Amino acid sequence: MTMQLPRDPMSPAFPAARAIEILTAEGAADVVDRSPSTIRAWADPTREACPNQNQARELDKACMATVQEAPFAEWYRRCKLVERDVGDLKLFDRLLDIGATFGLLQRAARELGGVEKLSSNQKSELCAAYQQFRDSATQMESTIVRMQPRQVAGGDV
């Protein structure tokens, strides 16, 4: 039996470990074009390795498509930097809601036999949900970039 290292829910190792649970290290590696050992390093709480924002977003999209869960977006919601700004929390909640809606519409389209079998109303709903998801993802990424901690005199600002 392999011993699991405890992961602080506020560390980036926490969502990386969840992404591995959902996708496997090999599956996650395929999503971000990295090796499985790199993915496992991201989930190791004793290492400083972590995915960049684009990789985290791609892993979230793959997890959303699989289990309607976005581990990195949920982690961002928990981070102290995000908790300070209620507007940003609403943005992340909105993104997760829109992503879940988009995922459900995609699944419904697959179950019906493809997009061509959707009614024009269903197609427009799917397109609108996709556009909202893309717009919110772009807005979330710019918000996250703004919130990155800066090291000043040995401490976070």
Image (cartoon, rainbow, N blue to C red):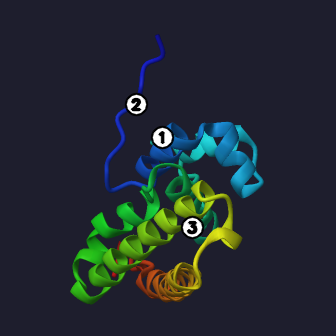
Sequence-wise, the earlier of marks 2 and 1 is 2
Residue position for label 3: 57
Residue at horizontal 70 percent and vertical 47 percent from the top: 29
Q: Which percent across, then down, holds residue 147?
A: 41, 83
- Residue type of the residue flagged with mark 3: Arg
Residue at horizontal 71 percent and vertical 57 percent from the top: 32
Quarter occupied by residue 76: bottom left
Sequence-wise, the earlier of marks 1 and 3 is 1
Taking depth in this image into account, of 24 and 114 the one nearest to the observer is 114
Residue 46 circle label: 1
Left or right for 65, reference 113 = left
Is the residue 56 above or below the residue 14 in the image? below
**Disc 1 to disc 3, C-alpha distance:** 23 Å
Which is in the foreground here, disc 2 or disc 1? 2
Residue position for label 2: 5
* Quarter that holds the C terminus: bottom left
- Residue type of the residue flagged with mark 1: Thr
